[in-house]
Image (tube, rainbow, N blue to C red):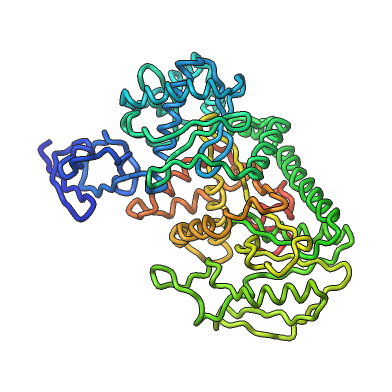
Amino acid sequence: MNKKLKILLPEGRVVEVPYKTPAIEAVKLVEKNIDNILSLKINNEVKNYKYELVKDSKIEYVTIESSDGYRVYSRTLKMVLYMALTSLYSNADVEFIATINNNQYFIINNMEITKEKIERIKEKMEDIIARKLPLEKRVVSLEEATDLYTQSNDIDKLQNLDNRLKSYVSMYFCDGMYNNFYGALAPNTGYVKTFDLIKYKDGALLVIPDKNMEINNKVTDIKLFDAYTEFNKLKSVIGISNIGHLNEKILQNRSQEIIQVCEAIHQRKLIELVQDIEKRKDVKMILIAGPSSSGKTTFAQKMGIQLKLNGYRPITISMDNYFKERKETPLDEEGNYNFECIEALDIDLFNSQMKDLIDGKTVELPEFDFVVGTKKYNGNYLKLKKNDILIIEGIHALNPICTEFTPQENKYKIYIAPIVTLNIDGYTKVSSSDIRFLRRMVRDYSTRGHSVQRTFELWKNVKKGEEKYIYPFVESADYIYNSSLLYEASVMKTFAQPLLLQIEKTNEYYAEARRLYEYLNNFLPMETSNIPFDSIIREFIGNGCFYR
């Protein structure tokens, strides 16, 4: 076929190429240096260099500056790590557990990781990267994949493959070794030359550069790490260490058992939390913060019930009532009101009222009218009595600026988030951010009238606000509550997948929608009738007993 295709490249440049030209060849017509281009987004889908163009197309570059680029870089580094470990310790049973400061923490279940071994593995990775070995993607039959993974003793991948309806599997091959990754890898191993590998706790950190290709191997999220470790132990107790195990139990009609155990764990942690508050005799104020869709609303109400059982009278105060007047609200770079930043709050008023309440004074609490953009005072007076305790929820609740006049002994800080999720396999760690996005998308579509497109549009700024105003204060928390549920993706699948299909192929968010849809494909669905009405997941899927 002699058909010529028009290809739109960044900066409005257009080139013409023959039918079935590999995409990278079109890029090379205008780019002399492609070393920082990890992959290509072709018509809103992330593809590898060799993808053949068959129609007029738009090509965008995937670099580490984007979330797609971070994932490609991370996957490629994991492939290099896999190759190094396979060469040095052929039976290493790797399990990536957590993301700490954007770096990937992993353990090797059947081997002690020492500093000496870390140095050896790192040297081998550097050698593999220096050789710029090509990473080849192949589609193989399920039977062949099963045979290959049996030979390499990758049992976790077999467990997941067995529950998939596909008759084929995409795998990456390099220098006689192979692995399966859910998404694109860089063209060769030389694209990930910036990295580090350091000993940490019982495992190691695979350190991934930031968008400026700079390394940050300083670990500060110690309390979060403890939450990861605890979750990992619970997975062992339940007998579900990956998606394959969960699917097996669903097939065995054990969904109710899984739900009951997971909810019991949440309840036990809630009781432990209130007991810890009770030990601290001077606590008058409980401050709750967490990223979007962490389950803060349900958590605060459930904690309130538990506090009542322990003799407290909880009083909830929303920091949203302390926004500045609309005319005083700061603007973002695009000229829109920025309600995420700390400057959007009337901090002086909040500080003074909280101090007055702790000091035993009477305060008239404001109520913010979001329609007209002003605080109103409707006679809502409050004076704390002996057993009263304040529950304050807000994005900035952990920021010390907001309560700088309140003595430390009177404050109890809680960070809540779905911190960890089930892995697809040992090398594929699912982001808790993805879980929160799916929660928000389902909830906002059914209760707030937001389209799926709107949720995608808001999400980037939401995450930016979290990184700036929540995460820096996590380590100051007195308690970290993990709101994730092992079974929730199986429940969310039924609600989320039809919504994700609303994103058309021409939409800029198509690649993200497709990635999330395919992630949910790994789960068997679980029906909701056995989920308790007070479960955190009800805040997002509905039919719960608490307000949303």
* Residue 497 place in picture, x, y as percent: 50, 48
Q: Using residue 24 as the reference point, say whether residue 482 is left or right of it.
A: right
- 187 to the left or right of 208: left
Residue 434 percent coordinates (x, y): 52, 48
**Viewer-proximal residue among 273 and 513:** 273
Work out whether 350 lies above or below 41. Answer: below
The residue depicted at 33 percent of the width and 49 percent of the height is: 44
Query: Quick one: 181 or 69, which is closer to the camera?
Result: 69
Left or right: residue 21 versus residue 495 is left
Picture quadrant of residue 541? bottom right
Query: Position of 492 compared to 123: left or right?
Result: right
The residue shown at (67%, 64%) is: 393
Q: Is there any visible trace of residue 273 in the rendered image? A: yes
Evaluate whether residue 133 shows in this view.
Answer: no
Q: Quadrant of the N terminus?
A: top left
Residue 121 to residue 350: above or below = above
Residue 316 image position (x, y, % from top left):
74, 68
Count of residue discs: 0
Please say if 144 is above or below 288.
above
**Near-viewer residue (204 or 17):** 204
Placement of the C terminus among the 4 image quadrants: bottom right
Q: Residue at x 50, y 82 (%)?
A: 327
